[in-house]
Amino acid sequence: MASSGSGYDLSSSTFSPDGRIFQVEYATKAVENAGPVLGIKCSNGVVLGCAKPINHKMVVATTGSYKRIHTCDTHIGCASTGFLPDARVLVQRLVEESADWQEQYGSKIPPGVLGERLGTYAHYFTLHGALRPFGAAAVIAGYDPDTKECSLQLLEPNGAPYMYYGVATGKGKQAAKTELEKLNLHKAPILAEDAVKQILRILYLLHAEQKDAKPIEIELSWICEASGWTHQGVPKDLLKTSQEWAKEQLEQEEEEGNGRRLN
Amino acid sequence: MSSNQRTTRPITTGTSVVGLVYDGGVLLAADTLLSYGSMAKSFNTPRLYSIEDRILVGASGEYSDLQEIIAKVKALALEESTTSSMESIYVERKLPAKSLWNYLRAVMYQKRSKQNPYWNDVVVAGYDEQTSKPFLGTIDKLGTTLQENLVATGFGAYLAMPLLREKWRPDLNEGEARALLEDCMKVLFYRDCRASARIQLAKCTSEGCIVSEPYDLDHSSGWNAPSMVRATGDLDGDRGS
């Protein structure tokens, strides 16, 4: 990296002359190298998905020791990527902030407020020379019981918690963003059931495009009417049929692609 | 008043909670009257709570303390479900009633050991999924725990307990259990000056928990009861019917 050795990247408390904070950019790099996370805000809910690379054959990937989607409150879910121990700290913070709000105000924390609070927290770690930024990103799915609205936010290592219609981060995020944009989510939101399919399709697509990719394990969760507006794992039968659909879809696309190349 | 001085008297109180184990579940009953000293303050205030539709908590005594206990319990249940979802998004580890009961024992004992007790006698009911057995237990304001088939707090410990002991069988069905508890609540309404005839029942079975809406006991025969006309001075009296 061009910045290496210039001395401006030793601490996140130092700007480079052209106004960059290299430590924060490096933290962002840590996110870009970890398994992808996708989120889609739907007309009837919000869906999160991630692909966990299985880096070791003997790791028990289906249990919580290697878990990327967490329930932070009944109405809040978080899919994280990047440096996972950092991500767990963010998740823990979400759990605490939600519980604090409940304790103080006797209601569920509005997801927007929660995102802002996590943003403030993460941002603090980009201000001090003695701290390092979080090498993790959190995609937060939330439901506001007051407004009956779902929301999707991405918190990046720099501490910015933006709202999204559809969002991707982690490895292959550019390709995933392109795919999400094709879905036109900002103009015509899709149903949660379809978002499950699309997320799976995109995750498999990213995996297929990756060279010498490790096997992956998929995690998918949602907040919608079917889950009682609480954050739950997508039911396994729906997951299975959607996985089949996604794989079929990719095969078709590949055939069409090959055909075009032949012509 | 020194900083060490504690409140040693409850102000806004609820009276008895009565509960029993029947064949296949637990049933609790409590009236919905809040008293302010000897005066009636509120007539429609529930004192039986369903935690995540799986555990029932009810209490007599200082109502603000009860609200604090319930807030604590709900926070604990939420913490359990958020941290247990660390295991897998599909595995929900639910707090068993017995664990909650034990947690409250620790809370109550710690508070009383600081000379600052929660002024409540608490009843915890649930259904143990591992043993497929109903659970019913109490914790008093000193932190004493009892696990029993029959519980009654407050005045109910004196007035309802003898009735429950006489009439209770382990094979009581739900209807019989309900009739027995309503009998107890009626007796309490007649004899306990801090009780009302507006009550709630709550049930916990393998299916989960339900707390009924408050409803009024039929007490139209009221003061015509033989023992009110001519007191028998005997437990074999009219049971308030």
Image (cartoon, coloured by chain):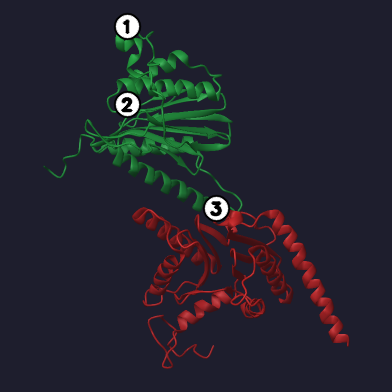
Q: Quadrant of the N terminus of chain A?
A: bottom right
Among the two numbered marks 1 and 2 on one chain, the one whose residue lies closer to the N terminus: 2
**Residue at 33%, 29% in the rendered image:** B196
Q: Which residue is mark 3?
A: B85
Question: Which chain is tinted red?
Answer: A
Residue at disc 3, secondary structure: loop
Q: Are marks 3 and 1 in contact (CB under 8 Å)?
A: no
Q: In the image, is A44 to the left or to the right of A119? A: right
* Residue kind at label 2, given as amino acid type: Gly
The numbered dot on residue B232 is 1
Do the residues at discs 1 and 2 belong to one chain? yes
**Which chain is disc 3 placed on?**
B
Within 10 angstroms of label 3, few (less than 14), some, or many (20 or more) residues? many
Q: Nearer the viewer, residue B127 or A216?
A: B127
Q: Secondary structure at mark 2?
A: loop
Point out residue A66 in the picture as x, y percentages from the top left corner.
59, 59
Residue A53 appears in view:
no
Quadrant occupied by the C terminus of chain A:
bottom right
Q: Quadrant of residue B9?
A: top left
- Residue at the (50%, 32%) spot, across then down: B203
Q: Secondary structure at mark 1?
A: loop
The three-letter amino acid code for the residue at tag 1 is: Thr
Question: Where is residue B152 shown, x and y percent of the image?
Answer: 38, 24
Residue labelled with disc 2: B154
Where B101 falls versus A112 (above or below)?
Answer: above
Q: Which chain corresponds to the colour green?
A: B
Q: Find the residue positioned furthest to the bottom.
A: A18
Q: Which residue is at the front of the view, B151 or A86?
A: B151
Residue positioned 84% across, 77% down in the render: A255
